[in-house]
Amino acid sequence: MICMRQFLLERTVPNLDRTSCHSSPSQMSFLSLPRELRNIIYAHIWIPFALLSDFSGLYLSCKQIKAECDLENQLSLHAYIRDLQTRAQGVRISLPEHNIIGSPRLHVSLATSIFTDYPTGPRELHLPLAASIIDEILSKPFASVVITYHEDNDVRFGTDNIRWIHQHLILGLALSAHKAHARRVVIEPPSLTGSWLGRWINLSVGAGLRHRDWTVGCVGSAWSKNDERRTGMVWERSNIGRNSV
C-alpha cells in the first residue's frame, strides 16, 4: 500500500518537491521525514474524516503537503469503500466526482431484493447485512450520505417493504442520535407514485419528528433518470446549516 501511495503521488504531482514549499524550518523538518512516516501522521490526523479546520494549518502550509493530504484522502476513501463493498452484496457505494477534503460525501444504492425476505414487525430485529453497513457508514462524520435504491431481479416495492425500511433502517439506524455522526442524510425511495409516495412521505416525516437532533424535509431527487420524479427525504443535524447534496 505504501508503494502504491508513492507511485500515485509521483504520477499525480510529479513536479512537486520540497522547493515548492517556501516554508519555515518546521515545515521543512516535517518534509524531511520519510514519506511512510508522514503517511502515518496523516492517518493519525484521521484523514479523510477529520474536519478541515482541525488540520488546516498543516494542509495549507505548502503545495507538497497539500498534495500528499489530497492523495491520502482519495486513497483512504477508496480503500474504505472497497472494504464495505466486499462485505455486502446488493449494495453499491460510490463517491461524487469531486470530494472535498474535510467534507467527504458518499452515495449508497441498495438493491430492492435485500428487503423482500425480512420481517416487518418492529420487534423482529433480524437485520440484513446491508443495514449494518448503513449503520457503519452513518457512524462516520460524512458531510452527506445519499441512500437510494435500485431494482434487481424484477423485485418491486410494496407496503411491507416501505414499513420495514422505516422501522429498521431509518428509525433504528439512520436517525439514531447516539450512533449516527453523518451531518446530512438523504433517503430517496424507489419509483413510487400516488398513494405509495404519500405513505413514504408520511412515514418519513413521522420518523423525523421523533428525533430532536435532526430536522426533516423534502428534497428533489438528484439521482433519478429519464426525468423520473421522486421525492427524497432529507435529515440534517439541527445545529448544521443546509448544504447541497
Image (cartoon, rainbow, N blue to C red):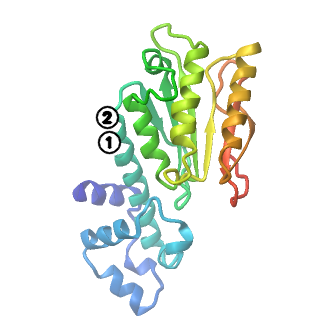
Q: Residue furthest front?
A: 123
Q: Is residue 63 above or below residue 155?
A: below
Mark 1 surroundings within 10 Å by alpha-carbon count, few (fewer than 14), some (14 through 19), many (20 or more): few
Q: Is residue 149 above or below residue 7?
A: above
Q: SS of the residue at dot 2?
A: loop
Q: Position of residue 19 (x, y in %)?
A: 41, 80
| Residue sitting nearer the eye, 79 or 16 | 79
Residue in view at x 22 percent, y 57 percent: 3
Q: Which residue is found at the position 58% from the left and 30% from the top?
A: 166
Q: Position of residue 17 (x, y in %)?
A: 38, 74
The answer to whether one can see residue 110 in this image is: yes
Residue extending furthest toward the top: 154
Q: Nearer the viewer, residue 76 or 140?
A: 140
Residue 235: give x, y in percent of width and height: 66, 44
User: Hey, what amino acid is under mark 1?
Assistant: Asp
Kindly report the distance in space between the C-alpha atoms of the residues bearing marks 1 and 2.
Answer: 7 Å
- Relative placement, left or right, of 56 versus 226 is left
| Foreground pick, 200 / 109 | 200
Q: Amino acid at mark 2?
A: Arg
Between marks 1 and 2 in the image, the one whose residue lies nearer the viewer: 2
In the figure, residue 84 lies in which quadrant? top left
- Location of mark 1 (residue): 83
The residue indicated by pointer 2 is 87
Q: How many marks?
A: 2
SS for dot 1: helix
- Tell me if 83 is positioned left or right of 27 in this view: left
- Asked if disc 1 and disc 2 are in contact, CB closer than 8 Å, the reply is yes
Q: Which quarter of the image is occupied by the C terminus? A: top right
Return the mark for residue 142: none
